[in-house]
Image (cartoon, helix red, strand yellow):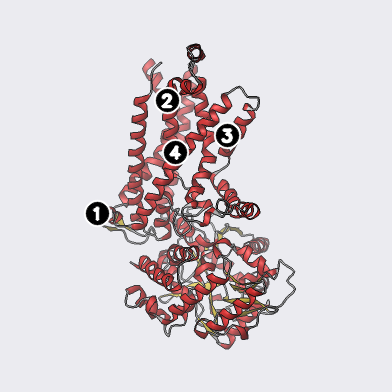
Amino acid sequence: MKFGKKAFGGLVFICLLLALAACSSGDKSSGGSSDEASGDGKSITIFQSKVEISDQLEELAKKYTDETGVKVEIWGTTGDDYFSQLQIKLNSEQGPSIFTLGNEREAEKLKSYLYDMSDRDYVKNIAPNMALKQGDKLVGIPYGVEGFGLVYNKDLVSPEDVKDYDSFVSTMKKLKGEDVNPISLSQEAFFLIGHMSNYPFALQDDYKSYIDKLSAGDVSMADTEEFQEFGKFMEAIKTYAPNPMDVTYDEEMGDFATGKTAMVHQGNWSYGMLSDYDVDFDIGMMPFPLMGNDKLAVGVGGNWAVNGNKSEEEIKAANDFLEWLHTSETGKKYIVEKFGFIPAMTNIEANDLDPLSQAVLDASNSGETIPWAINYYPAGVIQNDLTPAAQQFFLDEKMKGNDFIKDMDKAWDNATK
Amino acid sequence: MTRRKHWAWFLLFTGPLLIIFLTVVIVPFIVGSFYSFFQWDGISANPKVFTGFENYIKLLDDPRFMESAWATVKFTIFSVISVNVVGLTFALFVTSKLKISNTARTMFFMPYLIGGLILGYIWQFVFSDVFKLIGEMTGLDSIFFNWLLDQDFALYALVFVFTWQMAGYVMIIYITGLQGIPNDIIEASRIDGASTWQQLRKITFPLLMPAFTISLFLTLSQAFKIYDVNLSLTNGGPANATELFAMNIFNEIFGYGNYGYGQAKAIVFFIIVAVLALTQVYITKKREVEM
C-alpha cells in the first residue's frame, strides 16, 4: 500500500492547484471590486508616470506610513510607455489605487476606471481651469504647472540672438564655428518630436479645432504655414545638431551641464538632472522661435487620478492620501521642494524655485504662454506614429523638412483612421 | 488493479503540467480567438462590437504588418542559418581533442544563461558606444558604426545578438548528437581512406539528422517568436524597421488599443509559425537515417 499513499498525496496536490485556479478566476468575475487581499483601506498602491520623482515619492510614502499607519506601495515607473503599462495593469484587474492621467484623451479612454472627486474638499484649492474634467466630473488633480522651451547656457547664447528662423540659423552657425554644439534633442519619443511638434499646433488660432479638422482630413499640415516653417526649423536642427538618435536624455543633459552644448530643448523638469552637476554658468529658458514665437509652452504635465473600481475602503484611503499630499505641511513641502513642481494649487506657495521653474512661473503669471496642444493629440500618436516618422527624418540625410511634414501628415492619418 | 494504478501514476505526473498548460496556453488561446472577431479597445467596461472576419480582411491591407512580416521572415532565415552553423562549428570544436575544449564549452554556453532583456541592453551599449569608438580609432567606420541607427544593419545586429545567445544552446544538442555516433564507424571509414570532409559529409551529418531536426525546430520557432531581445536592443526602431511579429502585435494591442485586431494578428501569427515548424519537422524527419 506504499503506492496508495503517494498517489493520494499527489491527488491532494492537484486538488490544491485546482482550488487555487478556481480562486483566481473567481476574483476576476467579481469585477475587481476587491482583487487584492489588501483592499481593506490599510494599504494603497500608486503607479505614476514621472521617473524623476520616484525616489522622492518613496520617501514621502514612508513618512505617510509613519504618520497614519497606511501602507503606500509605489510601483516602478516606465517612462515613455507608461500609458500602455497602465492599461495592461488595469485590464488584468491589478490596477493601482492612484495613477497618472496625462490629459482628457486618456481620461476618455479610461473613463470606466475614473473616480469623481468633485465633492472632496482639497479639490477646491485647484487653480482655475487647471483641474482635469470629464463632462461635469472632476477626475484629475494637476501635478503642477510645467513648461518647456529652449534651455540655454547664458555664457554662450542670449535670447536676443534667437528671435526667428534667420537669427536662429545664424546663431547655430556661429556656435558651430566656436566648436560648441549649438542645440541638442534626444532620442526619447517626447524629447525627439513630442514637445517639438507642439509649436506649430499651439500657434494656430484655435488649436483644438485645428486638430479636429486635421483628424477629419479637412486640412493638412503640409498646407499650413506654421508647419512649413517647422519643417525648415527641423532641417536646420538636423544640419547643425548632433544626430538626436544617437543622444540619450542623460547624454543631452550631461553635455549641456559641461558646456559642450549651448541649447537643449527641454522643460523645467530637467533641472533635477542639472543639479547633479556643479554647473558654473547661469541657465535660462527661452521660447522656441517658430514664426517668431516669443512665449514658453506651459501646461499641466500629469494629473493624479483615483481608481474608482477599487473597494470603497481603498478609494477612501487613496483620497485620504491625496488630501494629505495637497494640504499637510509635509506634503506641500514635498511637492514644491522635492518634486520640484510648480504648484497648480492656490493653497501651496512656491518659494525658492530653481531658475527654470521660476521662468515658467513668471511666464504663467504674466499669461505670456502658448498652450500644450500635445494634451489634445489622439492618445498614443507621439509614441506610435510621430516618433517613427521623426526617426526616419533624422536617419535619412537626404530627407528635406517638407518631406518630413508630409510624413507627419501620413502618421497622423494612420493614428486617426 | 494494475490498470487503475497506472492511471493514478499518469495523473500524478501529467496532472499539474496539464493544468498549467490548460490555464496559460489553451484557455487564453480560445478566448483570444474569440476576441479576434470583435472590435474592442481592451478596456473591460467599453463595448465589444462583433465584426465577423473584418479584422482578418483588414490584415491583408496593412502595410505596417506586411513590413513587419517581411522583417520577421528575413530575421528568421538569417538567424536559423547563423545559429546552426555557429552552433555546429562550436560543437565540432569542443568535441575535438583540444585541451581548452571543456572551458570553451562553458564559455560558449554562458550567453544562453543571460536573459534576453539584459543581453539586449548590453549589446545596445556595445553597438552604440564600443562600435563607434572602434570605428573612430581604427578608421574602419564602414563596418564599425552604430548598427542600431541603420535600418538594414539594425536587423543584422538583432541576428548577431540572437546567434550569440542561442548558438551555445544548440551546440549542446549537437554535442549530444556527435557523441552518439559510434566510434567504430568513424575508424572504419578512416581505414578505408576517407578524408575529414568525406567523413563529415557521408557519416557525421547523416547520423546527426535527429539533432538537426530538433535544433532547426527550436531556432525556427524561437526566432519567429522573438520579443525580449527585440525590445531591449532596438525597440522596433529605427523607424519601425525592426518591428518583428510579436512586437507588432504588442504595439497594436497596447499601443493603439486595437485589442480585437491585434488578436486577429496573433492568430494569423500562430498559424504561420505552426505551419512552418511542422513542415520543417516533417522534411528533416524524412531525412533521418536509422543505424
Residue indicated by mark 1: B52
Chain on which label 4 sits? B
Foreground: disc 4 or disc 1: 4
User: Marks 3 and 4, Cα distance to the nearest angstrom?
Assistant: 17 Å
Look at the numbered disc 2 and give the secondary structure of its residue.
helix
Foreground: disc 3 or disc 4: 4
Chain on which label 2 sits? B
Note whether residue A359 is visible.
yes
- Residue B80 — which label? 4
- Residue A200 — which label? none
Label 2 crowd bin: few (<14), some (14–19), many (20+), radius 10 Å:
many
Look at the numbered disc 1 and give the secondary structure of its residue.
loop
Under mark 3, the amino acid is Phe
Q: Earlier in the sequence, mark 4 or mark 2?
A: 4
Chain on which label 3 sits? B
Q: Residue pushed farthest left?
A: B52
Residue indicated by mark 3: B109
User: Marks 4 and 2, Cα distance to the nearest angstrom?
Assistant: 16 Å
* Horizontal arrangement in the rendering, residue B135 relative to residue B216 (left or right): right
Under mark 2, the amino acid is Pro
Q: Residue pushed farthest bottom?
A: A366
Q: Earlier in the sequence, mark 2 or mark 3?
A: 3
Look at the numbered disc 4 and give the secondary structure of its residue.
helix
User: Marks 1 and 3, Cα distance to the nearest angstrom?
Assistant: 48 Å
Under mark 1, the amino acid is Gly
Q: Earlier in the sequence, mark 3 or mark 4?
A: 4
Q: Can you say whether B106 is above or below A280 in the image?
A: above
**Mark 3 vs mark 4: same chain?**
yes
Q: Are marks 1 and 3 in contact (CB under 8 Å)?
A: no
